[in-house]
Image (spheres, coloured by chain):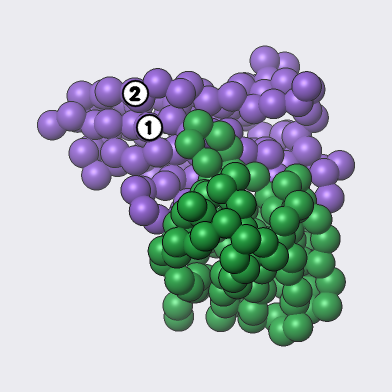
Amino acid sequence: SQKIEQNSEALNIQEGKTATLTCNYTNYSPAYLQWYRQDPGRGPVFLLLIRENEKEKRKERLKVTFDTTLKQSLFHITASQPADSATYLCALDPLDSNYQLIWGAGTKLIIKP
Amino acid sequence: NAGVTQTPKFQVLKTGQSMTLQCAQDMNHEYMSWYRQDPGMGLRLIHYSVGAGITDQGEVPNGYNVSRSTTEDFPLRLLSAAPSQTSVYFCASSQAPAERDSPLHFGNGTRLTVT
């Protein structure tokens, strides 16, 4: 079956270190992969989008990589801060899906001071 | 600029009751959608619309109806609430659907409990 997986266990990182979150998928040929941040009681907020022909995308302290051979995207937050604590969701667009993004369940990131 | 506004924030229904979840956006987005979010699962698409007068089913449409009479509004109707519909519901919008790399803008959700 087609699925997208994120680490269900919370990720605990010391402030100032780099946090790396993983998004793995099977049986898709995505055109785009997106990362969102979700805070408790709020809707997801868009962070970054990476296309299948892009290896890496950066925005300030954020970096996303996309490896279509490994079927994996990595999301990095450098110089992490307690304010970065949130749940991070990945979503892919399989292109043949008629506008239906496929979502991971999210990974909760906790940055400890 | 309010973005995507959802009402109500919380709702408790009894089994069999009906209700409408409201969603409005002020960004002139053509694409609007409804998702449900359950613990341990990714967001699941219920219904979506690529413009006024056009709607289509997502992954989990059963038990829900939608309509899109204006660009701004996209209400979600629960016809006869069931405990399995207990969830957090999110409305999201984005620019023209042909631009598949347009990010989604989400509301802050409606937490629905069906007893």
Seen in the image, is B109 located left or right of residue A10? right
Q: Nearer the viewer, residue A103 or B83?
A: B83
Residue under the point 37% across and 32% down? A108
Residue A88 visible in the displayed image? yes
Disc 2 residue crowd, few under 14, some 14–19, many 20+, Cα 10 Å: some
Tag 1 residue: A108
Q: Chain of mark 2?
A: A
The residue type indicated by label 1 comes to: Lys
x then y, percent, for residue B114: 51, 54
**Residue A29 drawn above or below residue B44:** above
In what quadrant of the picture does the N terminus of chain A appear?
A: top right
Residue B18 appears in which quarter of the rendering? bottom right
The CA distance from mark 2 to mark 1 is: 6 Å
Q: Chain of mark 1?
A: A
Q: Reading the chain from its start, which is encountered first: label 2 or label 1?
A: 2
Residue under the point 34% across and 48% down? A40
Q: Nearer the viewer, residue A104 or A18?
A: A104
x then y, percent, for residue A75: 48, 31
Q: Nearer the viewer, residue B29 or A70?
A: B29
Colour applied to chain A: purple
Which numbered disc covers residue A34? none
Q: Are marks 2 and 1 in contact (CB under 8 Å)?
A: yes
Q: In the structure shown, which secondary structural element does the residue marked by tag 2 occupy?
A: strand
The residue type indicated by label 2 comes to: Leu
x then y, percent, for residue B54: 84, 71
Tag 2 residue: A11
